[in-house]
Amino acid sequence: MAQRGSAIVLIGFMGSGKSSVGRALARRTGLPRFDTDQMVMRHFGGSIADIFASCGEAAFRAGEDEALRNVPSCPAIVVTGGGILLSPTNREIVRRLGLVVNLVADFEILVERLQRRSTRPLLQTQDPRATTLDLLRIRQPLYKAAADVTVDTSALTHDEVASEILRRTEEIRFHENRR
Ligand code: S3P
């Protein structure tokens, strides 16, 4: 693989805290933040629920692929949607952009967080809990394979998660620079 960039890329399941932690990291580091969900919404001019309803999931995924390709190679905080790694090309891009941080949380905590909002079209099913479990089974191996660092957000505040990410990524970069 080509040289890896200096971004911090947040991946993980819906409700794992990527957006809020991304904002905390950008505030703490002063780095620009690129959030693929927000980039897609800007492109389509509507919410994710609107995009899924009017154009379908395939159009959303195409927009998401394009958003990720448009993230510049520079020091930045990159926040991705929970389905970004379904595309093999995206799996390569996230690792090329920089260090990949997988945010995880206990299943019950994820379910509880996800129940608070009804903005996620994939979970508008008869049994969102079972859907969450099905999606997790497919996606967990993808997150795990792409990650340099995994942080469990279950019992931490967004700022605590951001501190842990900065500590771990600085440690990795310190060791890389000594090689
Ligand atoms: C999705 C996750 C969402 C958003 C869309 C699809 C997914 O982002 O991209 O609803 O497939 O997991 P978050 O992970 O930020 O909720």
Image: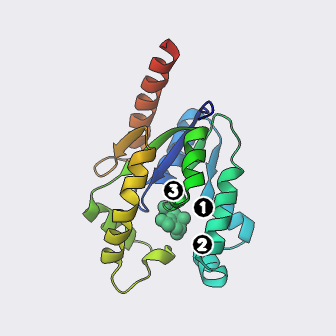
Q: Is residue 41 above or below residue 129?
A: above
Outermost bottom residue: 126
Q: Is residue 158 above or below residue 130?
A: above
Q: For ligand 1, tell me if the residue under mark 1 lies within 8 Å.
A: yes
Is residue 153 at least partly visible in the picture? yes
**Residue 1 place in picture, x, y as percent:** 59, 35
The residue wearing badge 2 is 48
| Scheme by which the image is coloured | rainbow
Q: Amino acid at mark 2?
A: Ile
Dot 1: what SS?
A: helix
**Residue 145 place in picture, x, y as percent:** 41, 46
How far is disc 3 from disc 2 in space, using C-alphas? Answer: 18 Å
How far is disc 1 from disc 3 in space, using C-alphas? Answer: 14 Å
Tag 1 and tag 2, C-beta contact below 8 Å: yes
The residue wearing badge 1 is 37
Q: Earlier in the sequence, mark 3 or mark 2?
A: 2
**Residue 131, picture quadrant:** bottom left
The residue wearing badge 3 is 85
**Residue 64 place in picture, x, y as percent:** 63, 62
Tag 3: Cα neighbours inside 10 Å, few (<14), some, or many (≥20)?
Answer: many
**Residue 98, picture quadrant:** top right
Is residue 118 at least partly visible in the picture? no
Q: Nearer the viewer, mark 1 or mark 3?
A: 3
